[in-house]
Image (cartoon, grey):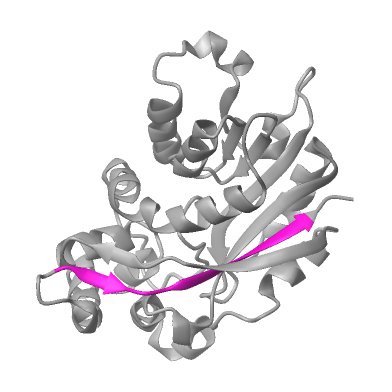
Amino acid sequence: MTPTLVQSHLPHAGRAPRVDLGARARDWAEIQERMLVPLYEAVYERLDVGNGTRLLGLGCGSGLALLMAVARGAAVTGVDASAPERLALARDRLLPDVPAAARARAETRLVEGGPAEAAGPGVPAYNLVTAFQPIGCMAGDSEGLSSLLEAAAPLAGHGAAVVLAGWGPPERCATSTVLRVATKLADPLRSAGSWRPASRDDLEEVAHRAGLRPDGSGRVACPFGYADVESAVRGLLSTGLFDAAVGATDKVQVDKELTEALHPHRRRDGTVWMPNVFRYLIARTP
């Protein structure tokens, strides 16, 4: 997914904030990334991922979804063009003992770049392509996804499965109210336009633009649970969705607004719990 929980194209009203990208990548890997594990599990179970699966993960990030596929016996290749810090964590997870010179020949491959960089002589066709970064909570968050899928399709065999993910209806996603803080702070005059609830056909429209044929879908409960409010704030900031808000105001203000937005979701023991529903679409290559 960019391997963020959702991709953001929010306007930057001020200077881009200084961010410790290494620390944010660790927060993503240690706190936020696991929130979508039920989605990965549901997709892999439905498609019977295992021995014989050759998976190409687009926007693989720190590699949790790939690691789960490897545990089922799949051969995986992950590509990511925009998050080298997360990709470094993926290498630590998936290729801890593989010398750099041998990585191109390994059953698990990680590539900084796009689908084109994953191609090469002798690379067998993939039979599963995943784009797990959910779309459908911010205006423009699907921009570029169709072209990415178009670039990946030639690397897959005829009729190969391609999986896209999206947010469910906002009334079934408690986190949607918290994410609105990002657009409100980034550009108050345009916040109504920047917020766009998920549409029922978001995923199908992306698939059609990429020349793919929809072939089934499903919904999965993916609650966001955190040990405390501080962990929730760190996890949500690690998505990158709030960078424009930090640039337009400052981190202190964003932390304050996020903490207030999370208050209704705090339980008596101090943990934070937000029920969400995500949707996935299975499409097929021509």
Q: Residue furthest left?
A: 269
110 left or right, relative to 205: left
| Horizontal and vertical percent position of residue 10 | 48, 71
Q: How many numbered callouts?
A: 0
What residue sits 54% from the left and 57% below the top? 133
95 left or right, relative to 165: left
| Horizontal and vertical percent position of residue 175 | 37, 76
| Horizontal and vertical percent position of residue 239 | 39, 58
Q: Is residue 275 magenta?
A: yes
Q: Which residues are magenta?
A: 271-283
Name the foreground residue: 225 vs 240. Answer: 225
What residue sits 74% from the left and 54% below the top? 147
Q: Quick check: 74 above or below 6?
A: above
Q: Is the stretch drawn in magenta largely helix, strand or loop?
A: strand
| Horizontal and vertical percent position of residue 93 | 39, 30
The answer, for residue 2, to whether it is visible in the render is no
Q: Quick check: 40 above or below 227?
A: above
Q: Is residue 187 magenta?
A: no
What residue sits 85% from the left and 58% below the top? 211
Name the foreground residue: 158 vs 151. Answer: 158
Name the foreground residue: 129 vs 193. Answer: 129
28 left or right, relative to 217: left
What residue sits 15% from the left and 64% below the top? 228
The answer, for residue 160, to whether it is visible in the render is yes
